[in-house]
Amino acid sequence: MFGMVKNVLNNLFSKPATRLYPKEKRPFFKGTRGSLEIEIEKCIFCGICQRKCPANAITVDRSSKTWQLNQYKCVLCNVCVESCPKKCLISKEQFNNPTTYKELYIQKQEAQEAAQEKEIKVAGVSSS
């Protein structure tokens, strides 16, 4: 009986053995591979990442300047990141948010260039 009381009191006044998760988040370890991102402005659409990908998760279309990643096929091996000649692929430590539907990660250079041109035209009209 005394042994149990001693154990209860010891646990009552000591620090918890685990983290209080929502409040205390564990930092990511060095080299954690969580998600794949691309800086589309740097990409030359050479297709090396597509050829090196062992899971065939990347699709590069040079003619329409699109880069597409199927995140459900990607095994986060970082072969594409290491083989990219322009170093426009980035392996982030943070994981993707959970979703209720499958979606493809598509980056289009044309769409971004058109948006930038539109901003320049709007800025030119408003400054005159």
Image (tube, rainbow, N blue to C red):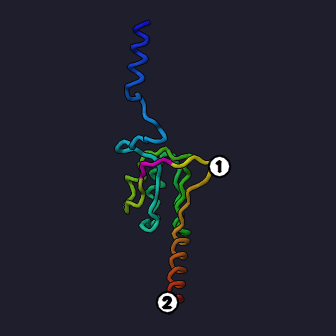
From the viewer's perspective, is 105 left or right of 46? Answer: right
- Kindly identify which residue carries mark 2: 127
In which quarter of the view is residue 115 placed?
bottom right
Task: In the displayed orientation, state which residue is furthest to the left.
Answer: 30
Element marked by disc 2: helix
Residue 39 picture location, percent across and down = 44, 63
Residue at (52%, 61%) from the top-left corner?
67
Task: In the displayed orientation, state which residue is furthest to the top.
Answer: 1
Task: In the displayed orientation, state which residue is furthest to the bottom.
Answer: 128
Residue 17 picture location, percent across and down = 40, 28
Q: Is residue 55 above or below residue 122?
A: above
Is residue 94 within the magenta segment?
yes
Residue at (37%, 42%) from the top-left corner?
29
- Region rendered in magenta: 91-95
Residue at (42%, 12%) from the top-left corner?
5
Task: In the displayed orientation, state which residue is furthest to the right.
Answer: 101
Residue 32 or 9: which is nearer the viewer? Answer: 9
Residue at (39%, 57%) from the top-left corner?
84
Name the kind of residue labelled 1 in the image. Answer: Tyr
Q: CA distance from mark 1 to mark 2?
A: 44 Å
Q: Is residue 41 above or below residue 116?
A: above
- Kindly identify which residue carries mark 1: 101
Query: Contact, CB < 8 Å: mark 1 with mark 2?
Result: no
Q: Residues within 10 Å of mark 2 (few under 14, many from 20)?
A: few
